[in-house]
C-alpha cells in the first residue's frame, strides 16, 4: 500500500536522519501501521503489502538493531512544526502515561500507578511508564482548538528495574527536564513556556529549568508563600524570605472577585484571586499565584502558579487548561494507533516501538492541519448535528482514503473501474476507522 504523496513528503522530511534503506523500511512500516488491525510487526507487513519487497526480518531489525535515533527523529519533527508556532513563545507540555503489558521478560516493565483504577485498593498495573514532551499547536482550520504533538520520549524505570539494568535511577521530573533542556538548548534565542501538572511543577523541576523557559503548574492549597525579603539594614545574615503571606486556601476563605472564565471548552463561574509571592524553596524567584473556586461545584478549590509574573489570573488559567490536550493525545494514540499493542521485549525495540505510535499521531495531525483538511468534508449524522470540528478518527480516515485514492489512481485501470473500486475501498476505510 502506497501512502499519499503529501504525507510521504512529511515522512521523508522527518526521516532524513536515516539512510536510504532504513527510510524505505520506515515508510512501509508506517503504511502498515495506518491500515493494520493490530499493531504487530507481522500485521503491519501484511497490511502494507511489503512481503514481496523485503525479508520480514528486516522489519523486525528496524526497531531492534537499525542505526537511527529517536531523539533525532523527534527534533526533525519539531523543525516541521516550528513554522506553525508563535514567534514569541512556544508552549511545551510534559506528562506521563501508562502502557499496560504482559510478561516478566519485557525490558523496563514494572508496577506503576494506573489512573483508570480509581475504585480499586491496589490501583497499579504492570507495564511501561512513558514520559512524553509535546508541543502545543493551533491550526487555521480550527483556531480555537489546541493540539499537543509529541516529539520526545523517555521510558521511566522504577528502582527495581534500574538496579536490574544497572542504570542510574531517574525520576519522571528528571526525565522530563532532560527533554525540556534538549529543546531549549537547541533554540537558545527562542522563548519557551512549559505546562505541567503537580508532578512536574516541584522543586527539582524549577531548579533545572533553562533560563529561556517559563513554567505554569499546579500548586498545593497549603503551600507556604512569602513576600519579598526586606532590605538589609545592619549586621548579621540577610533575610532569605519576607513576611508570611496567606496560603491559597486562606486566600479562598476571604472575599474574592467573581467572574466567568473560558476553560476546557466551557464557561465557568468562579471566585478568583491572585498575588505575587515566593515559595519556600525558591525565595529569590517571584511567581504569580492564582487561587480559584468553581461556583458550579465542578472542580472545587484549586491553585496554580506561573513564573510569568506579568500574566493575568485568567491568562494563567487558560495556559494550564491547554495542558489537557496531551491527555487527548494519549487517548487517541492508545485507541486508534495501538500505543500499547506492539509486543516488543528487547531494550531497543521497547524504547522505539511505542513512541513510533506517538510520532505517527503527530504526523497525521500535522498532515491534516496543513494539507489534509482541504480534502475533508463534514459529514454529520442526523443524531449528531452539533459536530463542527474533525476528530482524530476523521483525520485518520481522511489519510487512509487519500492513500487508497492515490494507490488506485496509480493502477492502469479504466476510469469506470477506478471509480467503482475507489468507492468500495473508501467506504471500507471509513468503517475501519
Image (cartoon, rainbow, N blue to C red):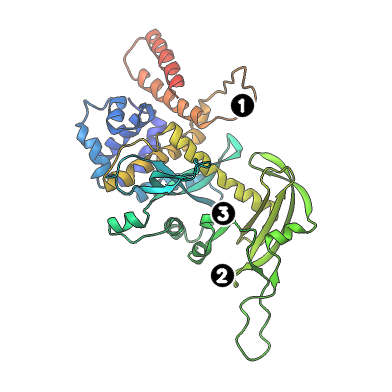
The kind of secondary structure element at disc 3 is strand
Q: Is residue 248 left or right of residue 14?
A: right
Residue 97 x, y percent position in the rendering:
45, 45
The mark closer to the camera, 1 or 2, is: 2
Residue with the most extreme front position = 121
Q: Is residue 317 left or right of residue 392?
A: right
1 or 2: tag closer to the N-terminus: 2
Residue matched to label 3:
89
Task: Measure the C-alpha gap from mark 3 to mark 1.
Answer: 31 Å
Q: Which residue is at the front of the view, 266 or 293?
A: 293
Residue 199 x, y percent position in the rendering:
51, 55
Which residue is at 36% across, 28% downward? 3
Instruction: Tell me the tag on residue 387.
Output: 1
Task: Measure the C-alpha gap from mark 1 to mark 2.
Answer: 47 Å
Residue matched to label 2:
281
Which residue is at 38% across, 36% downward? 9
Q: Which residue is at the front of the view, 221 or 80?
A: 221
3 or 2: tag closer to the N-terminus: 3
Residue 5 x, y percent position in the rendering:
38, 30
Residue 72 x, y percent position in the rendering:
35, 50
Amino acid at each position: 500500500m502506497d501512502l499519499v504523496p503529501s504525507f510521504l513528503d512529511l515522512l521523508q522530511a522527518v526521516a532524513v536522519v536515516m539512510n536510504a534503506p532504513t527510510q524505505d523500511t520506515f515508510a512501509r512500516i508506517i503504511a502498515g501501521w495506518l491500515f493494520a488491525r493490530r499493531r504487530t510487526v507481522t500485521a503491519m507487513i501484511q497490511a502494507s503489502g511489503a512481503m514481496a519487497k523485503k525479508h520480514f526480518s528486516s522489519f523486525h531489525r528496524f526497531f531492534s538493531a537499525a542505526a537511527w535515533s529517536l531523539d533525532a527523529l523527534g527534533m526533525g519533527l519539531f523543525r516541521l512544526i516550528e513554522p506553525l508556532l508563535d514567534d514569541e513563545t512556544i508552549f511545551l507540555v510534559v506528562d506521563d502515561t501508562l502502557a499496560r503489558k504482559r510478561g516478566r521478560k519485557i525490558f523496563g516493565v514494572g508496577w506503576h500507578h494506573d489512573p483508570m483504577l480509581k475504585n480499586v485498593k491496589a490501583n497499579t498495573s504492570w507495564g511501561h511508564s512513558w514520559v512524553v514532551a509535546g508541543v502545543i499547536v493551533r491550526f487555521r482550520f480550527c483556531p480555537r482548538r489546541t493540539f499537543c504533538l509529541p516529539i520526545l520520549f523517555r521510558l521511566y524505570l522504577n528502582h527495581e528495574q534500574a538496579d536490574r539494568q544497572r542504570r542510574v535511577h531517574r525520576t519522571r521530573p528528571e526525565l522530563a527536564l532532560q527533554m525540556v533542556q534538549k529543546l531549549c538548548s537547541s533554540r537558545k534565542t527562542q522563548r519557551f513556556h512549559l505546562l505541567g501538572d503537580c508532578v512536574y511543577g516541584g522543586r527539582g523541576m524549577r531548579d533545572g529549568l533553562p533560563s529561556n523557559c517559563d513554567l505554569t503548574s499546579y500548586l498545593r492549597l497549603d503551600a507556604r508563600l512569602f513576600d519579598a525579603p526586606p532590605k538589609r539594614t545592619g549586621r548579621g545574615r540577610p533575610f532569605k524570605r519576607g513576611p508570611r503571606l496567606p496560603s491559597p486556601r486562606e486566600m479562598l476563605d476571604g472575599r474574592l472577585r467573581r467572574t466567568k472564565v473560558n476553560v476546557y471548552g466551557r464557561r465557568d463561574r468562579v471566585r478568583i484571586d491572585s498575588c505575587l509571592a515566593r515559595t519556600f524553596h525558591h525565595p529569590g524567584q517571584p511567581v504569580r499565584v492564582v487561587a480559584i473556586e468553581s461556583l458550579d461545584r465542578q472542580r472545587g478549590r484549586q491553585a496554580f502558579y506561573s513564573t510569568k509574573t506579568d500574566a493575568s489570573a485568567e491568562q494563567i488559567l487558560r495556559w494550564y487548561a491547554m495542558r489537557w490536550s496531551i491527555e487527548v493525545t494519549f487517548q487517541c494514540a492508545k485507541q486508534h494507533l495501538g500505543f500499547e499493542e506492539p509486543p516488543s521485549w528487547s531494550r531497543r525495540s521497547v524504547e522505539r516501538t511505542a513512541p513510533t505510535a506517538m510520532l505517527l499521531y503527530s504526523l497525521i495531525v500535522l498532515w491534516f492541519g496543513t494539507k489534509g483538511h482541504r480534502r475533508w468534508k463534514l459529514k454529520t449524522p442526523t443524531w449528531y448535528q452539533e459536530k463542527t470540528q474533525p476528530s482524530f478518527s476523521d483525520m485518520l480516515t481522511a489519510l487512509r482514503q487519500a492513500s487508497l485514492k492515490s494507490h488506485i489512481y496509480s493502477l492502469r485501470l479504466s476510469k469506470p473501474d477506478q471509480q467503482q473500486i475507489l468507492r468500495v475501498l473508501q467506504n471500507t476505510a471509513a468503517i475501519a476507522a
